[in-house]
């Protein structure tokens, strides 16, 4: 199973992808990787700064949305991009859903980090999370 695939011909001024995972944890991490890769080359990002955060939501869709928005917020507000995404705790059996994450990255350095796109937000257009025969799939479109 691929962690994520970028989608073409879905939106002209946006970036679209599907993220996959055998578990909700894997789905969230793979979607975080896709968002980061849409912004910069992830393999060029160091792990100098660690940040922990938690998100709570009534649905897995909203939980994933909140996590991805946090990654984008940290890029905009603190000029940070991330390489590692670790889930320290997750509750997806029943609402409220909860995830506690530790992410590692570094300040954006335009000489080091090859910029792909300036991602502004996750859109709700064609956004969904579904359970599949192999696990989970998320459809995400990023506003750039």
Image: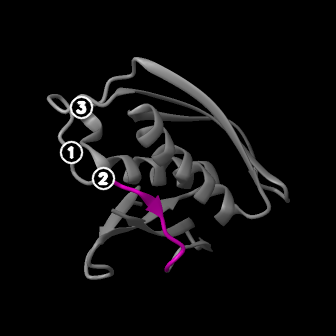
Taking the spot 47% from the left edge, 37% from the top edge, the residue there is 77
Task: Work out whether 71 lies above or below 79.
Answer: below
- Upstream in sequence: badge 1 or badge 3: 3
Estimate the x, y position of residue 33 in percent, counting from the top left.
40, 47
Marks 2/1: CA distance? 8 Å
Marks 1/3: CA distance? 11 Å
| Circles 2 and 1 in contact, beta carbons < 8 Å | yes
| Circles 3 and 2 in contact, beta carbons < 8 Å | no
Estimate the x, y position of residue 132 in percent, counting from the top left.
58, 73
Q: Is residue 45 magenta?
A: no
Query: Could you say whether the residue bearing mark 3 is in a helix, strand or loop?
Result: helix
Q: Report if residue 26 is visible in the image.
A: no
| Region in magenta | 119-125
Foreground pick, 113 / 73: 73
Outermost left residue: 111
**Mark 3 = which residue?**
44
Rendering quarter of residue 95: bottom right
Query: Could you say whether the residue bearing mark 2 is in a helix, strand or loop?
Result: loop
- Upstream in sequence: badge 3 or badge 2: 3
Marks 3/2: CA distance? 17 Å
**Mark 1 = which residue?**
115
For the stretch drawn in magenta, the main secondary structure is loop
Taking the spot 17% from the left edge, 40% from the top edge, the residue there is 114
**Mark 2 = which residue?**
118
Nearest-to-viewer mark from 3 and 2: 2
Estimate the x, y position of residue 26 in percent, counting from the top left.
55, 50
Query: Could you say whether the residue bearing mark 1 is in a helix, strand or loop?
Result: loop
């Amino acid at each position: 199973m691929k962690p994520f695939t970028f989608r073409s011909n879905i939106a002209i001024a946006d970036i679209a992808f599907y993220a996959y995972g055998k578990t909700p944890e894997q789905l969230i991490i793979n979607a975080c990787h896709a968002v980061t890769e849409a912004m910069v080359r992830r393999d060029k990002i160091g792990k100098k700064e660690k940040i922990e955060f938690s998100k709570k939501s009534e649905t897995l869709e909203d939980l994933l949305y909140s996590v991805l928005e946090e990654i984008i917020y940290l890029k905009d507000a603190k000029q940070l991009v991330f390489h590692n995404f670790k889930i320290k705790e997750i509750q997806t059996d029943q609402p409220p859903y909860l995830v506690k994450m530790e992410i590692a990255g570094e300040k954006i350095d335009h000489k080091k980090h090859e910029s792909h796109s300036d991602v502004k937000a996750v859109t709700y257009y064609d956004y969904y999370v579904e359970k599949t025969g192999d696990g989970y799939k998320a459809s995400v479109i990023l506003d750039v």
